Amino acid sequence: APPGHTQDGGQDTSFQWQCVDQPIGKLLFRRFLEGAPEFAAAGALWSEIEAFEQCEDTEREASANRLRSRFFTPGGSEHCGFLSATATAPPTG
């Protein structure tokens, strides 16, 4: 296993396992994000990305445009300035 990925007993301590795959861990982490003003936009972005992943193909372009203007554009209502330019770049191809 990669360093830092597991601890004694082989228990997975990765972010993916603790905060995404485990329902209680996900709930607690989301509540943490929503409860901290400096992380609230990150929590909202996570929720909106999950909703985007579930939307119909015909709704994806409009949903993606809303995500971009709300979270990825400076001056957007919940701009996530901590994201890299690579993370927020429109897809190519």
Image (tube, rainbow, N blue to C red):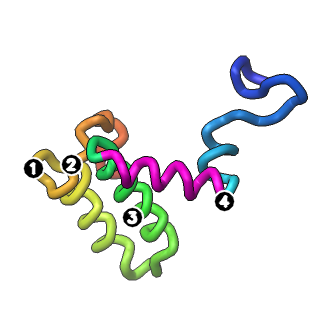
Q: Nearer the viewer, mark 1 or mark 4?
A: 4
Q: Tell me which label, 1 or 3, sits earlier in the chain.
A: 3
Give the labeled residue for mark 3: 48
Which amino acid does the dot numbered 4 rest on?
A: Pro
In this orientation, does residue 55 appear? yes
Q: CA distance from mark 2 to mark 1?
A: 6 Å
User: Residue placed at 45% from the left, 48% from the top?
Assistant: 32
Which amino acid does the dot numbered 3 rest on?
A: Glu
Give the labeled residue for mark 4: 23
Q: Determine the residue located farthest toward the front in the rendered image.
A: 35
Tell me if residue 52 comes above or below residue 28 in the rendering.
below
Q: Are marks 4 and 3 in contact (CB under 8 Å)?
A: no
Question: Which label was assigned to residue 12?
Answer: none
Q: CA distance from mark 4 to mark 2?
A: 27 Å
In this orientation, does residue 92 appear? no
The spot of residue 1 in percent (x, y) is: 80, 24
| Mark 4 secondary-structure assignment | helix
The spot of residue 12 in percent (x, y) is: 77, 36
Q: Tell me which label, 4 or 3, sits earlier in the chain.
A: 4
Based on the picture, tell me whether residue 30 belongs to the magenta stretch.
Answer: yes
Question: Dot 1: few (<14), some (14–19), or many (≥20) neighbours within 10 Å?
Answer: few
Q: In terms of depth relative to the viewer, which is nearer, 87 or 38?
A: 38
Question: Which label was assigned to residue 79?
Answer: 2
Based on the picture, tell me whether residue 42 belongs to the magenta stretch.
Answer: no
Q: Quadrant of residue 66?
A: bottom left
Task: Describe residue 73's horizontal placement relative to residue 26 as left or right.
Answer: left
Give the labeled residue for mark 1: 75
Q: Are marks 4 and 2 in contact (CB under 8 Å)?
A: no
Q: In terms of depth relative to the viewer, which is nearer, 78 or 84?
A: 78
